[in-house]
Image: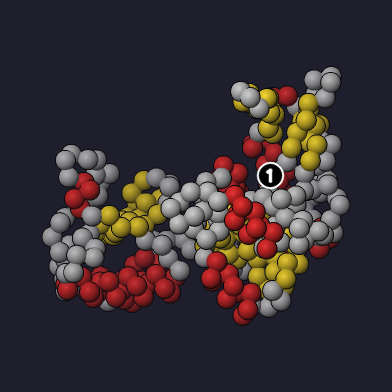
Amino acid sequence: NTFVLLIGNIGDGCTCFSEYEASLVKYCKSENALIYTTKPVEFDGGRELYGLKVSSASGYETMAIFVDGELKYQRQREGEHDEWSNNPTTFSTWMRQRIDYSDMLYINIDQFETLKAELPQFTIGWMRADCGDCSYVERNFLKTFNLQDRATSYVIDCDVPGIRLNEDGSVNQEKWQLFKDEHFLSTVNNEALGYGTGYVPTWQHVVSGQVDDMEVYFNDSVTKKEDGTFYVSQTYWDDSRNHEFFNYLSEGTTTNILNLEVPEEDIETYDYPGYGTFHMWKQEAAAKYHDKLLNDYLSFYLKK
């Protein structure tokens, strides 16, 4: 819902774009920023403009900032010699005045390996773009949490080739399982802190290249009793692991939700032909417990 969009004929070989491109590259590298691009032709044929200034003329590219799904800021270049776009300092200042920068940054797996080699300790989150639980925590808890001033942390999207996907975009479950084992998400190489076969979203605190603590969000199982009531039958949070942040819990944080009774109105039931009936703990209900755990975990490890 919140993103930066550049509208222009990028990559068409126009030399008049080179200075602006230098400003963009410098800005993206210094801020670890992500800017989406689209060509003006995409808006031809009566497609909705969303209030955007669209021009196919070189030197009149538009930079737009969307916040919560709506266009909030935009600026169009005033020709190829435009000071705002061609001066990296001027451009960066304009962007900084309009964008809130999160201290939780997306990185790739190569950058992760560099962090392990160079940083004495850091916190990393493992997520997937195609994961409902990941989307939930990102749009709800993290959106608010990351507005606060924290130490820098990192997130990796695992739905990419080389981790969970093949080069053609198809899912490779064997590769994905091996990856989870190798990166200590499962219990295969991390009996003390791992969880089952490994799940996302999960956060790890890494010290000297080794996983020192771990936090698993959601991924609980609920079971229906003979009397028709439901309870949490499997969870990462069963008090079987020792977590340092337990010594600094905020009021109301529950560290053991195993066997917790779950009201029927907090259960979603799914029938899958050939597989049977499955019961799921509604995200909004489970979040009442998991948000507090994740908040205390991240607050402890990301305090400045």
Could you say where residue 16 lies in the image, as x and y percent from the top left? Answer: 16, 72
Residue located 57% across and 42% down the image:
132
Residue located 15% across and 64% down the image:
58
The extreme bottom residue here reads 118
Q: Which quarter of the rendering shows the C terminus? A: bottom right
Residue identifier under label 1: 218
The extreme top residue here reads 227
Which image quarter: residue 95? bottom left
- Above or below: residue 22 compared with residue 270: below
Residue located 75% across and 27% down the image:
263
Q: Looking at the image, can residue 194 be seen?
A: no
Residue located 65% across and 58% down the image:
178
Q: Looking at the image, can residue 123 be seen?
A: yes
Could you say where residue 180 lies in the image, as x and y percent from the top left? Answer: 66, 57
- Could you say which is closer to the camera, residue 62 or residue 235? 235
Q: Amino acid at mark 1?
A: Phe
In the rendered structure, the answer to whether residue 251 lies left or right of residue 151 reads: right
In the rendered structure, the answer to whether residue 40 lies left or right of residue 135 reads: left
Secondary structure beneath label 1: loop
Could you say where residue 207 lies in the image, as x and y percent from the top left? Answer: 72, 73
- Could you say which is closer to the camera, residue 6 or residue 133? 133
